[in-house]
Image (cartoon, rainbow, N blue to C red):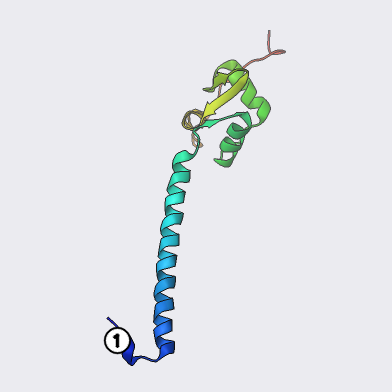
Amino acid sequence: MTDFLHLPLVEVLKLLVRGSVEEYLAEKEANASARAVTTANNECESLDMKGALEFLNSNGYPIKKGQLYKETSAGTVPFQKFGSKLHFRKSELLQWAEARLIDGNAVGVLVPATTGKGGRR
């Protein structure tokens, strides 16, 4: 412990301020990490169509809105409906997207295309 009686006033003030600042910064850092954990826990697993598109594209699975609608219509992508709105779960979307990947070393492997209107007869 420091003997404050034998130190000049300026040194005593420096020590007091330094201790207060360190305490404040430690408390601020603890609060920030607690908020980060809370935010991560509150992050929603369910996505609407726009969120699903952003999620897939940001995770390296480029897809357009029309294609995602086709996949839901064909029943190949997992989704739920709430009223008339489509909702997707992040974990199910990732599993679905990863299942559609093709091995780059495979020769002659084609992904089956869904036939829509105007296809072969």
* Residue furthest out toward the front: 5
- What residue is drawn where x is 44% and y is 41%? 41
* Quadrant assignment, res 110: top right
Residue 30 in sight here: yes
Counting the numbered discs, the total is 1
Residue 111 coordinates in the image, percent (x, y): 55, 24
Judge from the rendering whether residue 51 lies leftward or rightward of residue 12; answer left or right. Answer: right
Estimate how packed mark 1 is, as few (under 14), some (14 to 19) or many (20 or more) residues with alpha carbons within 10 Å. Answer: few
SS at mark 1? loop
Q: Label 1 sits on what residue type?
A: Asp
Residue 97 coordinates in the image, percent (x, y): 52, 31
Quarter of the rendering occupied by the C terminus: top right
Above/below status of 117 relative to 103: above
Judge from the rendering whether residue 30 lies leftward or rightward of residue 111; answer left or right. Answer: left
* Residue furthest out toward the left: 1
Above/below status of 89 relative to 119: below
Quarter of the rendering occupied by the N terminus: bottom left
User: Quick one: 105 or 91, which is closer to the camera?
Assistant: 91
Above/below status of 120 relative to 46: above
- What residue is drawn where x is 39% and y is 92%? 8
Residue 34 coordinates in the image, percent (x, y): 42, 51
- What residue is drawn where x is 43% and y is 47%? 37
Residue 113 in sight here: no
* Quadrant assignment, res 77: top right
- What residue is drawn where x is 48% and y is 45%? 39
* Residue furthest out toward the right: 118
Q: Which residue is mark 1?
A: 3
